[in-house]
Image (spheres, grey):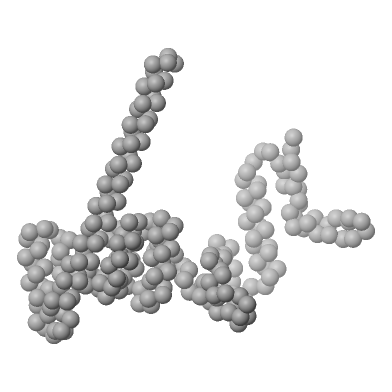
Amino acid sequence: MSLKKVEYQDLLTEVVALIEKTKYQVVSYANSSLTILFWHVGERILTQNLQNDRGEYGKQIVVTLSRELVKRFGKNYEEKNLWRMIQFVKQFPEIENVVTLSRQLSWSHFLVLIPIKEQPAREFYGKLAFESSFGVRELRKQIEKKTFERIEKADIQLHKDSIIKKGIFKDPYLLDFLELKDGYLENDLESAILKELELFILELGSGFTFVERQKRMIIDGDDFNLDLLFSIVR
């Protein structure tokens, strides 16, 4: 490959990277702006019409407003969506918090968070999605796995010892993939984990050889059982 062609490829790679980066920034900014807009719309409706009037008149205002907004701006402002915006404000009353989260989370993320009734859980999942850059699907998965509840349960058990601070378990151990039945013994857990490790090691292929599980060995006159024994192939 000639020097000029190499230089061209380098130039192309850099320009493509710049364009992709800018496209991502534009999309992120647009999503953030839309989310903040929806919060302000919900807040305006809530304070103007519903805060002091929870009756039929307040509901009718939402219906009428929705019809006018749909005509001008499209389906984003259908009645059901306006109610979601109102609920959005109720669940996330601090605009500063919304601004921060919206830098990473889209409106679709917030639609997953809004139905969570408990504030600590809602804040936990919002922060988790923000810090881990979770997509909507992964956020739903974390909620379905009850990640917050598992961490809280671990905290409660440990909190009996005043020396251990609450929240020490940042990440719970999710062992659903082991398919263990309720009431399993420690030996069952060990066997299930080791089975998965065996399969993983065997899938790695060449480079080393899996020898045996629970290999009995005598070292300095003492018996030992090695959980996994493998040797490197040179």
Q: Nearer the viewer, residue 94 or 124?
A: 94
Work out which residue is located at the far right of the displayed protein and give it. 221
Work out which residue is located at the far front of the displayed protein and give it. 96
Task: Look at the picture and state if 231 lies above or below 45.
Answer: above
**Residue 138 seen from this side:** no
Work out which residue is located at the far top of the displayed protein and give it. 2
Image position, residue 113 (x, y; %): 34, 68
Image position, residue 126 (x, y; %): 38, 65
Q: Horizontally, is 229 left or right of 167 in the view? A: right
Quadrant that contains the C terminus: top right
How many numbered circles does the render carry? 0
Residue at (29% x, 51% y) in the render: 28
Quadrant that contains the N terminus: top left
Residue at (29% x, 71% y) in the render: 94
> In the picture, residue 99 is in which quadrant?
bottom left
**Residue 29 seen from this side:** yes
Residue at (25% x, 72% y) in the render: 89
> In the picture, residue 97 is in which quadrant?
bottom left
Residue at (63% x, 51% y) in the render: 199
Image position, residue 158 (x, y; %): 60, 77
Q: Horizontally, is 198 left or right of 177 in the view? A: right
Q: Nearer the viewer, residue 27 or 44?
A: 44
